[in-house]
Image (cartoon, coloured by chain):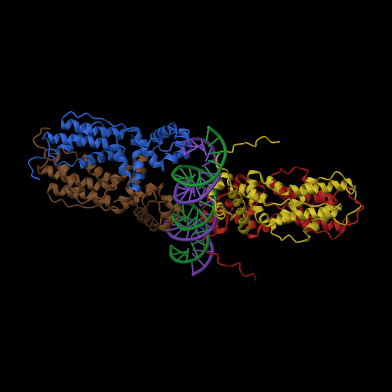
Chain colours: A yellow, B red, C blue, D brown, E green, F purple
Amino acid sequence: MSTDPAEDRRGRPRSTHAHAAILDATLHLLTEVGYTRLTVEGIAARAGVSKTTIYRWWPTKSALTVEAIRSGSTPAPVEPTGDLRTDVRAAVQAVVDCYARSAVGAALPGVVADLVQDGTAGELLDALLHPHRDALQRIVRDAADRGEIGHDVDTELLHEVVAGALFYRVLLGRRMSGDVAEELVGLLLDGLPGRRGVPR
Amino acid sequence: MSTDPAEDRRGRPRSTHAHAAILDATLHLLTEVGYTRLTVEGIAARAGVSKTTIYRWWPTKSALTVEAIRSGSTPAPVEPTGDLRTDVRAAVQAVVDCYARSAVGAALPGVVADLVQDGTAGELLDALLHPHRDALQRIVRDAADRGEIGHDVDTELLHEVVAGALFYRVLLGRRMSGDVAEELVGLLLDGLPGRRGVPR
Amino acid sequence: MSTDPAEDRRGRPRSTHAHAAILDATLHLLTEVGYTRLTVEGIAARAGVSKTTIYRWWPTKSALTVEAIRSGSTPAPVEPTGDLRTDVRAAVQAVVDCYARSAVGAALPGVVADLVQDGTAGELLDALLHPHRDALQRIVRDAADRGEIGHDVDTELLHEVVAGALFYRVLLGRRMSGDVAEELVGLLLDGLPGRRGVPR
Amino acid sequence: MSTDPAEDRRGRPRSTHAHAAILDATLHLLTEVGYTRLTVEGIAARAGVSKTTIYRWWPTKSALTVEAIRSGSTPAPVEPTGDLRTDVRAAVQAVVDCYARSAVGAALPGVVADLVQDGTAGELLDALLHPHRDALQRIVRDAADRGEIGHDVDTELLHEVVAGALFYRVLLGRRMSGDVAEELVGLLLDGLPGRRGVPR
DNA sequence: ACTTAACCGAGACGGTACGTCGAGTCTTTCT
DNA sequence: AGAAAGACTCGACGTACCGTCTCGGTTAAGT
């Protein structure tokens, strides 16, 4: 449907090889040395590309990193089973996996800190996590349709709590032990345990 | 007989004025330009102090920033009322206030990213939030003593979720609307609303 | 019957317009910004031509500049009167005028410095000044034929002294006052004034 | 006699070693690769000094080169014998030697071209040649006192012609053959040879 | 009073990376 | 085949901060 196929095809076309090599090099260096020790010169060297070429396409180190991280993120499709607890747990675990993925985990704090400067941190986090947010939303909606929970759940908030709490762990440098997801799910589904019969 | 009080007190004593001026300048510049655009030279200039003096007492820019942030944080004493919901809400609000405090909000992401490098991010966050964690713990314990909730609540996790979810908001640059605490408390105390009668 | 007109005339013929526009743009930019701040990209833009076209015909910036300067130099025809002093003075003045011509004066030091690298500075200078050297040579020869001076004058040296002394003035940025030629001629024709009767 | 001994001795004193090493490295690289291929980065590397230190003291490559060339120039004292031709010849030869000195000869065209941009080329040339100009002036004055020539000789012009004509040779890349000075002196002292009895 | 040791201000230094600029080459499509 | 557009490599530029290092001068506690 889009009508711009002709566009402007004059001039030497952008080298797809260079483009890919740059993103790839960025991703690898990111996991090896982390964001702050990541240098544009190093990326250029590793990608076999000149610094100028990098700056032609990305205005800044953080912009490049953002795209590299995005390009390396897999959608993580989760097939809902119909059991609320199981599905939420899987969704939470998917976020854990996303953060734990080498490049992301190593780089996220640094990049995000850089992006906070221009207020675009949200975009990156959103780009990274929106599949998970959508999955969570669907799970919650389905459960509500089944009558297991009410329809008034704030999915947005729920996702934010999950994403935030886990990101916090990344910052603290704590290993993502296998039970994190389990415990978090318990808290979120049941509220403070043992609490019952108390009117709100 | 404590031993080290004598030490060797000869020589010019440390200038308390310079010390205070440095922390003050750091705090102000932090809120004005943010962590990444904060320069040691700028701090020295603003404090009317030489760079040497700064580096004599703090090994790095981040160490100085950490102390400055700490020095500017007020303990935030909350008097528990005995009502669980009210008290938790107040505790959460205290964390919100802590993050929202000018210097902290502006600087936290940057400093934390720096500290993540050496794995000391936890210390800063902990130094900043441990009063709140303690307060939360006491609130929860009291409620358990009153029988309102079980004794098996993981306070640590609870605090982490609160601190993380709110920090996430700071990163996103969202204003801390007045209801954040309210909503968060709702989720944490009750779990997914409308849920009942389902065995764990 | 010259033979090469046939050559191989396939393909699109060279655009004479582009060629002229490039030389013209070069000349103008040369007088406006000087040689070092002259850029090939700037020339291309001003000539409404692509960089490729420039490099197709000239191997380097300096080569282009050389041709531009040459193309802008007028032969400077001097009609000898038969009076030695008058004619030499006119010849010297012609060199002064050549140097003073806008583009040349502004650009010469820079281009020459570039050409010195490959030892081709002589070619440019020669191309620029050989009409004047020839004129000078003819004047001197005529005078010798008339018996006014000996036949053993080293015209080459004479021309070099004139060209060099005046070029030096260009370098110093001194205005070419009207009397330069006069004074120089005096020195060259008479030697140190007032000197007489001293055997060589 | 100067009274400023106190000056301002605060702060770390400038490293004389670094200063000397920089000038030395500049001089050597100049003779090895020439001015245009001379880079500040290369100088820094060779001098074992950081680029910053160079830029702290010299605003530009040309300024540094100027000082380096100056620092490497020896006064070249010539003892006048009392014979005009001999002394002038020696003076001219001194200029030849000055130009021929490795660093100067290799670099002069480039530096001068750079300096022409800001109109300070004269300063360098003057700094380099003023001892020779003074020597020439004295020789001419002495000869006039002895009555060999008139008192109205324009020494300035004479020096300019010598300096210019020889510089021109440098530009052309011609070797400074041993007779250059001889021939030049002949022309300057006698005017066009064979010419006599012609009233000015 | 007089050391003496630790402080402080000033500022030069090495180092690392930044983002920019220009020369010259190469690769397309259009004419 | 020539021309236009423009992506590309290479090399150097000048700047900014970091954290280190000397200096000269200052200020108390000890003798």
Q: Residue at x 86, y 51 (%)?
A: A82
Q: Is residue D80 left or right of residue D63?
A: left
Q: Is residue F6 left or right of residue B149?
A: left
Residue A10 in picture, x, y percent from top left: 56, 38
Q: Quadrant of the N terminus of chain B?
A: bottom right
Residue B194 visible? The answer is yes
Residue B193 visible? The answer is no
Say if A173 sits above or below E23 in the image.
Answer: below
Residue A192 in picture, x, y percent from top left: 84, 55
> Which quadrant of the view contains residue C19?
top left
> Which quadrant of the view contains residue C83?
top left
Foreground pick, C193 / B67: C193
Callout count = 0
Foreground pick, A150 / B31: A150
Say if B196 sits above or below C55 in the image.
Answer: below
Q: Is residue A140 left or right of residue A1?
A: right
Q: Quadrant of the C terminus of chain B?
A: bottom right
Residue A40 in picture, x, y percent from top left: 56, 51
Q: Residue furthest bottom?
A: B1
Foreground pick, B182 / D52: D52
Q: Residue furthest front?
A: C1
Residue A87 in picture, x, y percent from top left: 83, 53
Q: Residue at x 10, y 44 (%)?
A: D146
